[in-house]
Image: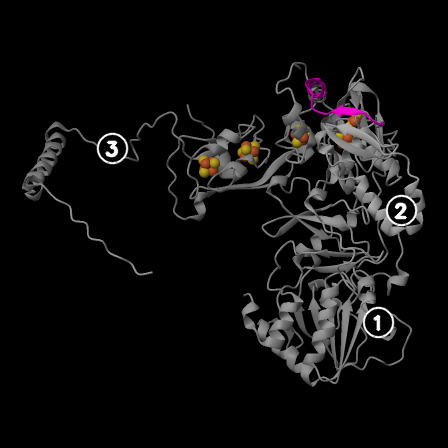
Amino acid sequence: MVTKTLNVSRKHEIKEKFYLIAVLQGMWITLKYFCRGFFLWKSYTINYPEEKRNYSQRFRGMHFISYDENKIENCTACYLCQTVCPAECITIIAEERDPLKNPSGVWKEKKPKSFDIDALRCCFCGMCEESCPKDAIKLSRNYELATRTREQAIYNLDHLKREVKGRG
Amino acid sequence: MSFNNQNIVVNKRRMYINYCSDKKPLENLEDQENLENQENQENQKNRPLKNKINIDGKEIEFLPGDTIMQAAERGGIAHKIPRYCYHPGLPIAGSCRMCNVEIEKASKLMTACSTPASNGMVVHTNTSKVQKACTGVMEFLLTNHPLDCPVCDQAGECELQEYNYEYGPGTSRFSETKRVFTNATTKRLSDKITLNMNRCINCERCIRFEETITKSYELVMLNRSWEKELTLSNYESDENDKDDEDKMPTKGLTSSYQGCLADICPVGALTFNDFRFQKRVWFLNRQPSICDACSKGCNIEVHFENDIIYRYTPIFNEKVNRHWMCDRGRISYHDVEDSGRITMPFMNTIDSHLHSVEWMTVLSYLKSTLAIAKKVLIILGTDSTCEEAKLFINRIPSLSKGEVKVCFYNGTGDVSSSKDDEKIDYLLQMKDQTANTKGLELLGIPPLETSYVPDSTDNTDSTDSDVVIYFRSGRAGVGGRGGLELKLKSSASLFLWGVFYKKELDKAALKQIVAIIPGLMTVEKSGTFINCDSLSQSFTSAITHKGAALPADVIFQIMILENRSAIRS
Ligand code: SF4
Ligand code: SF4
Ligand code: SF4
Ligand code: SF4
Ligand code: FES
């Protein structure tokens, strides 16, 4: 198909055409903020790693999997989060829990053998948290997700069990 | 011979194995009987007056002796009646009371599964009275039910879940502690079946299955009421070892149809270990196919996701397997997924090692070898489809000017043709462990002469072919007399075509194999099998080919038409 170019001519007022006014307006804003920072010591940035911004209590950050008093993860590998996840970033492989290492008896006969979340695909919608019948997967308020490699951004079960503090 | 005569078309309704019944609409039944046995026509005329029952406004004709449920099955509306203990393949128990229906002029609700239908009965399946009764039954069933659907493998195909959506009260008035069978929460009944007694709803389908279908009587219910517990009848407790209460009994279940217990159990109480926790059922795609593990040809459904097979389940077919299938067939999908399966073309180079090669290299080599061969022997494994056999008969002569001989080879156990085939148990399993021996015989292909077979006493020298092509789909000659150890002339070149495993090649005379051409297993291809009862059944492919394997017709197309576009990398 041949691409067609359509020229749209917009009518500008004389004030807009004479853009020196806009330039001066911009310069005024720059000058205003410069003076605030320079003379009044008011800044709009923070010294990030030392200082942290306080986000809302409802901010959704990195996932974690909660565990019980025996350090056994609450997840029973039901696959509901994998089913519901719109970004398809959760991959679970289930297996049977060794009955001898199963102090909680009936409720935990199945466990995740591997539980991976690809944080690069995750859109932090929180649907996994909502669907989980065991309140196992939760989103914390941790937003520091930077990693050196892409592989590190795929969280496995051990990584997910590290962090246990939920949102407010 | 036409393949289309008695084809069983595997249709969608049959997929719901616990709902399929051989109770057909009577009009069809009459047509069939008229066709099948002409002598019965006299009886047909003297048939008693038509019996009619009205279920939800639908007039259904039934045979004397049918229950209301069976009459509903004849009318194709049995799915309107909920049920737990009723199973069309098992005797009637009437123990769950889920199948309540309201009958006009009857003072109380009746169970559809066990009340005989009578002429002129008017039945309603969905009145408010029925709904209320079903809600009551559901509430009782759920009092002690653990509701651990997240853990339970049945979730997604659970009748308790389904009927609870439809009839359940939604809330529970039960505030007491639920009953827990601590010793039977994860109890291995055998290496194939695991019981979780907490989920059992005491429908006793499993017990009736053991009593009537396998006749092994290995399951019983102990105690009554809340304490009612399913146990093995051959449990032998150890007197000296009193603490070890949940020890594995000495024998466990022994029948070869244990997988069916997991199929018929309406809840997740009995689960099949091979599938246990492997996949949630709602991820699985389903495709009907035919089991190729024996000559019975049971109708199966292949459950797969992303071309990985997770399980086989039976499909109802009155003429072949009814509701059941054997465990050997059920786990035979592991052969498709076997990591040792050869799925790349290989050629034997001068140093007697097999090397992976391009498709065109091996096919042009095969073509040139066939062109100069004087005597070509095609050995078709009896697991080939009829279509593949025809393809070899028709196509090879156009590629070779020499004398072409086609014969079939079974090589499972001591079976060599369908005459040796026989039932090895009371239900389905056959001695012949390949699917299409009958089909190749009906195509007029002779069996392989005994002089080729490794341990035969026949020493006449007829093994004089230059080129031998051994074609099979992974079943013929497996586990029997070692299909690869054929007695061949030492200068003959052997082409292996189809499904072969690396472990077999270690045994084989490597220097005779010149090339391996990877082919497809039954679930990967389409075709027709003719089973031991001469019933022809067609199937289409369920999953795409593993690795670089190609269907036989595509390979012939490439060789004859030089059409390379079909090759996938
Ligand atoms: S937050 Fe949303 S996108 Fe991320 S894992 Fe959960 S369900 Fe998937
Ligand atoms: S929904 Fe919860 S219990 Fe289920 S698999 Fe996900 S984290 Fe585990
Ligand atoms: S048997 Fe059905 S209702 Fe019961 S836990 Fe399993 S899936 Fe849920
Ligand atoms: S184990 Fe399953 S089939 Fe057997 S009685 Fe219990 S619910 Fe019914
Ligand atoms: S199905 Fe009729 S009583 Fe159980």
Chain to which mark 2 belongs: B
To which quarter of the image does residue B181 belong? top right
Q: As rendered, which of A22 and B47 lies closer to the eye?
A: B47
- Kindly indicate whether the residues beneath marks 2 and 3 are on one polypeptide chain: no
Front tag of 1 and 3:
1
Residue occupied by mark 3: A46
Residue for point 66% across, 30% down = B162
Front tag of 2 and 1:
1
Residue B338 can be seen in this image: no
Q: Amino acid at mark 2?
A: Tyr
Where residue A52 appears, x then y in whole percent? Answer: 31, 31
Residue occupied by mark 1: B446
Ligand 4: does it lie within 8 Å of the C-beta at label 2?
Answer: no
Q: Are marks 2 and 1 in contact (CB under 8 Å)?
A: no
Q: Amino acid at mark 3?
A: Ile
- Tell which circle, 2 or 1, labels the residue nearer the N-terminal end: 2
Where residue B126 appears, x then y in whole percent? Answer: 69, 24
Dot label at residue B160? none
- Kindly indicate whether the residues beneath marks 1 and 3 are on one polypeptide chain: no
Residue occupied by mark 2: B426
Where residue B491 appears, x then y in whole percent? Answer: 75, 82
Residue B487, above or below A162: below
Residue B73 is a magenta residue: no
**In the structure shown, which secondary structural element does the residue marked by tag 3 occupy?**
loop
Range drawn in magenta: B118-137
Residue B269, above or below A153: above
Residue B270 can be seen in this image: yes
